[in-house]
Amino acid sequence: MSDSHQSIAPSPPSQFPALDIETNPHDYSDIDSGFGASIARTENSYSMIAGSGIHPYVYENGRRYQVYREGVYMLPNDAQEIERLDHFHRIFLALLDGKLFIAPLGQDGHRVRNVLDIGTGTGTWAIEMAEEFPDAKVMGNDLSKIQPSWAPRNCEFEIDDVESDWTYPENHFDFIHLRSLSGCFQDWDMVIRRCYDHTAPGGYIEFQDYDGNLKSGLGTMPDNAVSRYWGVVSEAASSTGRTFLVASTIEERIKAAGFVDVTVKKEMWPLGPWPKDERLKEIGRLGRTGMRSAVHAFASALLTRVLGWDEMQVQKLCQEATQEVNDGSAQLYVTAYFVCGRKPL
Ligand SMILES: C[S@@+](CC[C@H](N)C(=O)[O-])C[C@H]1O[C@@H](n2cnc3c(N)ncnc32)[C@H](O)[C@@H]1O
């Protein structure tokens, strides 16, 4: 990765409610106090300072944001957001019937030795992957240190910016995973090209996300508070060069980078329990809770920093959008994309 990365080795042992898949085993009690050791800023890098009082976060309109590469990523990293990410983790699992990936890992001579989880967030996917493949080494990177201070021995986290130069070895990873990263990068082709260079021959890339188009089971998307909300949030993101409209473009991008045997799986992600189908109804319950927790997280920095709104305006729109989500009559949904491809031998 970039020369600015920080390896955060796990300390020694110390994201959809109705499914109740399992209780969250993570202990985030140390998160709000920042790192066990804080980060100090140098021109281009950060270093760990044990016991320093420097706080590595900025607070704005009641939300906490990362300082590293400040402003690059517009969503918060506070306790509320950590809960949201783990809730979304549950939705992604529910959409894949409990699986962490769709790639045919470990088949036809493929071995899972090195795994990279780009923009790992809370690290929950990386931790579960490390548990599923105890002989593999799983690396999760992120701009924010919001991963738990413990992890399986074969799972590590580091703070890094994947839009900077990578220092990982080339042809190294047997699996590179990117989930829920729409809106994060200005140049997706560059990130995917790097994934290609750093994937081992025969290894896989997998992208998982929902597309940025809000749809309605009624057919035409009504002109309601949620569509107005999503319209301005999406416009603000696009104007920074980091559009949310990414998922439907990934198949072509990973083919263009050289990946082969590209597989695309699309799933309906309802934002309420309106579908008749029991499985979708269940996902819809999770989706509704997820949407409620996402409304303010997506809007606050984008609308205030980029479009110049004041927080009261943001709150008002968020309340109206949340009411619409609770009401449910618009039968909202998005489409989830799972796209994987293999680097030729
Ligand atoms: C919506 S979260 C998804 C987290 C995780 N992949 C998941 O599915 O739960 C997006 C994450 O990407 C991280 N991120 C954004 N831009 C990044 C960058 N340039 N380099 C590394 N991480 C980045 C953010 O800090 C955030 O934790």
Image: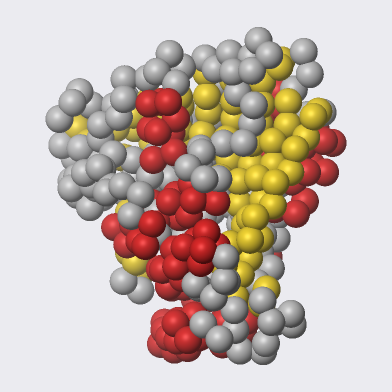
Quarter occupied by residue 256: top right
The structure residue drawn at horizontal position 27% and vertical position 49%, both measured from the top left corner, is 23
The structure residue drawn at horizontal position 48% and vertical position 54%, both measured from the top left corner, is 91
Q: Where is residue 35 in the image (x, y as percent from the top left)?
A: 25, 41
Q: Position of residue 7 (x, y in %)?
A: 38, 26
The structure residue drawn at horizontal position 63% and vertical position 65%, both measured from the top left corner, is 334
Q: Where is residue 314 in the image (x, y as percent from the top left)?
A: 46, 82
Q: Which of 271 and 223 is in front in this view?
A: 271
Q: Is residue 78 left or right of residue 109?
A: left
Q: In which quarter of the image is the N terminus?
A: top right
The structure residue drawn at horizontal position 34% and vertical position 29%, both measured from the top left corner, is 8
Q: Is residue 323 left or right of residue 64?
A: right
Q: In this view, does 192 lie above or below 293?
A: above
Q: In this view, does 106 lie above or below 176?
A: above
Q: Nearer the viewer, residue 113 or 267?
A: 267
Q: Is residue 295 above or below residue 218?
A: above
Q: Position of residue 232 (x, y in %)?
A: 62, 78
Q: Which of 231 and 161 is in front in this view?
A: 231
Q: Is residue 330 above or below residue 296?
A: below
Quarter occupied by residue 224: bottom right
Number of dots carrying numbers: 0
Q: Which of 332 and 257 is in front in this view?
A: 332
